[in-house]
Amino acid sequence: MILSTSLLSTIIFLVAIVFSMLGQGGGTLYTPVQVLFGIDFHTAATSSLFLIMVASLSATLVFRKAKKIDWSLALVLESVTTIGGFIGGFISGNISGQNLSWFFSVLVAFAAIFMIHEFKQKSKLLAVKKYWFHWLRQFNQQHYTVNLLLALPVSFFAGLSSGLVGVGGGILKVPLMVLLLGIPMDIAVGSSALMVGLTAAGGFAGHLVVGHWDWKTSLILGVAVFIGGQIGARKALSIDKKKMKKLFGWFLLAIALLMVIKNMPADYVRELLKLLTDDHQSATFVHQIA
């Protein structure tokens, strides 16, 4: 039991480092890792939300000191995201789990491509315009303009999608803030670190009411997450912005690929694996599906 808890804590610690570097809470991996260690899914999900809150707090302390959190922007966007998340969670029961997984895979893969590829942002052009729906931000010696007519619906969509597929939201918030809203990568990561904790708090409260929380395990893992969050957030301050963006993109692509493989029928996956080891069977399989 002690060995199992120690191993779980080590894995969670490493996950916290990586996710905190990218402004993420870590829920995408916290829950499945716990389930693999035999923890009930509902309990794992509740603990995951708690750990996201801890990771968010830890990373926020670092990003706040480094002035990487646009507090006003984060709170405005998060208020809309929370509404979308509630609606997404409410209607998710009407959609099959497999369809939601496919939706998640496509959504994440789309975001990954835009993060990896070099697209020119138009934030500098918007910064010189002064329409009523353009929110000019001057933060930490950086100037950028947020189009509220785009930002609010996009944030709502991010929350809706997060509620549908059961993730903290950072996996969507960062690429949307960078690519669609023209927010600098370092500010997007820092602000997202704060926002994912607020999003997770609502879900955690709901699970807590029905008694899913294993507080002993959560507190042990919480210590590992807090330390990992400190290390990851500090590392994020020194990493090159372009490298951070591409790193996040490849991370998203890997998550999407794992989801696609998980959604594929078992027989089809076995046939695909055979393609890697048997040329004759590979040719036969291609002929069958042609």
Image (tube, rainbow, N blue to C red):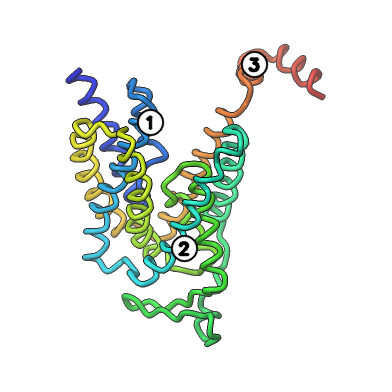
Q: Nearer the viewer, residue 63 or 45?
A: 45
Q: Amino acid at mark 2?
A: Val
Q: Amino acid at mark 1?
A: His
Bin the neighbour count of mark 1 within 10 Å (Cα to Cα): few under 14, some 14-19, many 20 and up: some
In the image, 234: left or right of 121? Answer: left
Distance from the alpha carbon under mark 2 to that under mark 1:
26 Å
* For discs 3 and 2, the disc positioned in front in the rendered view: 2
Q: Position of residue 240 (x, y in %)?
A: 37, 59
* For discs 1 and 3, the disc positioned in front in the rendered view: 1
Bin the neighbour count of mark 2 within 10 Å (Cα to Cα): few under 14, some 14-19, many 20 and up: many
Q: Determine which residue is flagged by label 3.
A: 267
In the image, 224: left or right of 164? Answer: left
Q: Amino acid at mark 3?
A: Asp
Q: Determine which residue is flagged by label 2.
A: 80
Distance from the alpha carbon under mark 1 to that under mark 3:
29 Å
As drawn, the label of residue 229 is none
**In the figure, 162 relative to 118: above or below?**
above
Q: Earlier in the sequence, mark 3 or mark 2?
A: 2
